[in-house]
């Protein structure tokens, strides 16, 4: 991390360095440790500034800013969601983030967050499932086998012990890729011909599809008593994955209701439909799963505190490693009021070097 006298330099974690950091830590260890940071910040939920993300929607996708602060640190993430990008070989979701010191306003970390968002989303899903999934769950259906699927599988294995996967995607090649990527990690994997087949015998059902539209990935007759649903894919207005009747049969848990009612599955329900905030369950203020036959639904859209937790974790994890570069990001003149003088001194230096 920055040495004394380098206050104008900001640690930067590139995609390459993020991959090296994750691999040096170990994927399952990284997810487990990250989950602990996420859970810790949910427990102190009331310490955070909270606002629904600032979104700019277009016909092709969405660009969002996700800010929050606990009064000591400030963090934000820039993230997009463009499902059509895959047609041109680009990612559906890309992101970067900044962690800053509230007292000075100086950035403490700049990092890629495309990989990190996939990790924090999976870790958050597994944290929620720890409180909501059936006891002793071993089998998970993964419907939608895109970029998020392997991360979800690894998080549920590391944190809940899930070791049986039932995969389904409308593109069979996506399921085949997912199975290949997860070989050697201790899973028993079955590729299914339909969503109905995938949920048979599953304790947990994760939906993580990408199309920006309202769809019925799970119909009411697919969901039996006792299942936990981890609904990850519905994350913007007009995009849902579950039939409305499933919501009416489920106990619903959300991150930040003002955001989820706009972007989550519950946009299909009246604004006064009861939901439970996840932080209240984690803090012990409200119950999670109460009965074996209960259907629980984590209506996950992602929230800024989760990114804040991820930024905090990465900053701490970098200590003692070389998995970052130092960026000359901040103008920091010797005399704070003489910013223009910096230009003149640079001009003189350039002239002397010619």
Image (cartoon, rainbow, N blue to C red):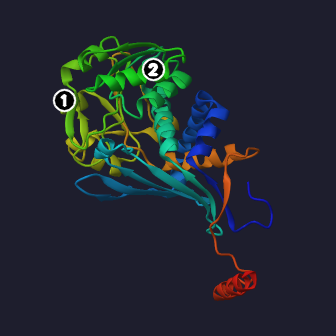
In the rendered image, residue 308, in percent from the top left (x then y), is placed at 54, 50
Label 1: which secondary element: helix
The image quarter containing residue 341 is bottom right
Q: Residue furthest front?
A: 354
Viewer-closest of 244 and 336: 336
Numbered tag placed on residue 245 in the rendering:
1
Residue 353 vs residue 169, the one in the foreground = 353
Q: Nearer the viewer, mark 2 or mark 1?
A: 2
Q: Which mark is residue 335?
A: none
Q: Does 250 appear above or below 269?
A: above
**218 w.r.t. 16: above or below:** above
Q: Is residue 7 left or right of residue 231?
A: right
Q: Quadrant of the N terminus?
A: bottom right
Residue under the image location 42 percent in, 18 percent down: 134
**Which mark sits nearer the N-terminus, 2 or 1?**
2
Q: Is residue 201 left or right of residue 194?
A: right
User: Looking at this view, is 343 or 287 the one in front?
Assistant: 343
- Tell me which residue sits at (20%, 25%) in the image: 219
Q: Quadrant of residue 269?
A: top left
At 33% from the left and 37% from the top, the residue drawn is 233
- Residue 137, given in percent of the width and then of the height, sits at 45, 15
Q: Is residue 337 left or right of residue 165?
A: right
Q: Is residue 284 above or below residue 5?
A: above
* Alpha carbon distance from label 2 to label 1: 35 Å
* Crowd tier of the residue under label 1, counting other residues whose Cα lies within 10 Å: few below 14, some 14–19, many 20 or above: few
> What is the quadrant of the C terminus in the image?
bottom right
* Residue 106 percent across, percent down from the top left: 63, 67
Q: Is residue 124 visible?
A: yes
Q: Label 2: which residue? A: 180
């Amino acid at each position: 991390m920055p040495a004394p006298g380098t206050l104008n330099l900001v640690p930067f974690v590139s995609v390459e360095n993020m991959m090296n950091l994750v691999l040096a830590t170990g994927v399952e260890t990284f997810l487990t440790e990250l989950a602990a940071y996420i859970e810790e910040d949910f427990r102190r939920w009331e310490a955070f500034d909270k606002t629904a993300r600032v979104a700019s929607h277009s016909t092709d996708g969405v660009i969002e800013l996700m800010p929050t602060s606990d009064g000591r640190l400030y963090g934000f993430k820039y993230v997009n969601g463009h499902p059509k990008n895959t047609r041109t070989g680009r990612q559906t979701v890309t992101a970067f983030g900044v962690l800053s010191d509230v007292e000075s306003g100086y950035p403490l970390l700049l990092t890629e967050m495309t990989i990190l968002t996939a990790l924090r989303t999976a870790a958050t899903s597994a944290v929620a499932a720890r409180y909501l999934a059936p006891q002793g769950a071993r089998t998970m259906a993964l419907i939608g086998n895109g970029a998020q699927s392997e991360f979800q599988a690894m998080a549920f294995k590391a944190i809940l012990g899930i070791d049986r996967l039932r995969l389904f995607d409308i593109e069979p090649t996506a399921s085949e890729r997912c199975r290949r990527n997860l070989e050697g990690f201790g899973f028993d994997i079955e590729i299914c011909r339909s969503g109905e087949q995938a949920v048979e015998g599953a304790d947990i059902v994760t939906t993580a599809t990408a199309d920006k539209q309202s769809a019925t990935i799970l119909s009411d007759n697919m969901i039996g008593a006792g299942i936990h649903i981890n609904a990850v894919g519905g994350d913007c207005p007009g995009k849902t994955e579950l039939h409305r009747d499933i919501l009416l049969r489920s106990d619903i848990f959300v991150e930040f209701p003002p955001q989820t009612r706009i972007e989550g599955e519950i946009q299909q329900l009246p604004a006064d439909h009861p939901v439970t905030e996840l932080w209240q369950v984690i803090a012990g203020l409200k119950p999670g799963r109460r009965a074996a036959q209960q259907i629980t639904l984590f209506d996950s859209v992602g929230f800024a505190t989760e990114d804040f937790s991820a930024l905090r974790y990465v900053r701490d994890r970098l200590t003692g490693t070389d998995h970052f570069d130092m960026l000359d990001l901040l103008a920091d003149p010797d005399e704070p009021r003489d910013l223009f003088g910096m230009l003149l001194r640079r001009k003189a230096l350039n002239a002397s070097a010619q």
